[in-house]
Image (cartoon, rainbow, N blue to C red):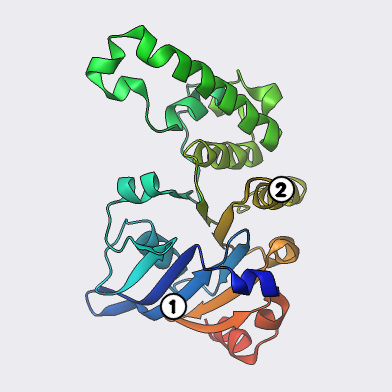
Amino acid sequence: MGALMKADPPVLRAEKLVKRFGGLVALDRVSIEVRPRTITMLIGPNGSGKTTLINVISGVYKPEAGRVLFNGMEITGWPPHRVYEAGVVRTFQIPEPFTRLTVLENLLVAARGHAGESPIRALFRRCWEKYEEELVDRAFKVLDILGLESSWNKPAYQLSGGQLKLLELGRALMGEPRLLLLDEPVAGVNPKLAYELMEHLVRLKEELGLSFLIVEHRLDIVLDYVDYAYAMHRGRVIEEGAPDEVLSSKAVAEAYLGA
């Protein structure tokens, strides 16, 4: 990573996280960092703890030990909705949009702070009319960034697999995140759309100053877009550094061959 990245305090810091499921230690004192305006990647064979780590950071699981800091604020054990409100937003490997809603409607329902969430405010149009206009404008900007503007009025069930991944990313962006946790963002996507999706991430990083922590197996596609990498095996971080250096590590090769 560049000197500027190292000089900046991390957006995310996970310190010595431990997570157990009965006798299985899924995370064994795991520590990672995500720097501002970077794409950081987690790799490792299946069962190495990558998704468990994402679940702990996003509040789905509470760790037995360790802590999670976001922009210097400890968020360890916060429930998912509170982590989301703080600015940490995640996506899932399998997108689950509202299939009968249009692409635009899916974005609108994903935004936070809807006036309709308050029964009293919902009764008074002047309390939410301007907000709704701004929300639609923001949604169309997201669609433009992701190249989905021509599909805004399509029902979600008519989208291709790659477009569904973009819609999932768009829904996450409507939460106005500072850090996005992406679980296999290009899984099941044809190579052309997969490269386009990664280019969208770079654009979001550069133009909006967003940071990303991604779990991904399709290293042939994502490697050139990643700034920093961590390799995990059996619940531990076994290597970290520049992506090509991590992939060439003997420990990483042995972890994959032995998995």
**Dot 1: within a 10 Å radius of its alpha carbon, few (fewer than 14), some, or many (20 or more) residues?**
some
User: Residue at label 2?
Assistant: 203
In terms of depth relative to the viewer, which is nearer, 166 or 205? 205
Q: Residue furthest bottom?
A: 250
Q: Is residue 250 above or below residue 28?
A: below
**Dot 2: within a 10 Å radius of its alpha carbon, few (fewer than 14), some, or many (20 or more) residues?**
some
User: Residue at label 1?
Assistant: 31
Q: Residue at x 22, y 75 (%)?
A: 22
Q: Position of residue 119 (x, y in %)?
A: 23, 18
Q: Residue at x 64, y 91 (%)?
A: 250
Q: Position of residue 94 (x, y in %)?
A: 50, 47
Amino acid type at circle 1 is Ser
Q: Is residue 152 above or below residue 6?
A: above
Q: Position of residue 160 (x, y in %)?
A: 64, 35
Image quadrant in which you'd find residue 212: bottom right
Image quadrant in which you'd find residue 154: top right
Q: Secondary structure at mark 2?
A: helix
In terms of depth relative to the viewer, which is nearer, 162 or 80? 80
Q: Residue at x 41, y 64 (%)?
A: 72
Q: Residue at x 43, y 81 (%)?
A: 234
Q: Earlier in the sequence, mark 1 or mark 2?
A: 1
Image quadrant in which you'd find residue 76: bottom left
Q: Is residue 6 above or below residue 107?
A: below
Amino acid type at circle 2 is Arg
Left/right placement of residue 235 relative to residue 190 reads: left
Q: Give the CA separation, mark 1 to mark 2.
A: 28 Å
Q: Position of residue 175 (x, y in %)?
A: 46, 39
Q: Secondary structure at mark 1?
A: strand
Give the quarter of the figure containing the N terminus.
bottom right
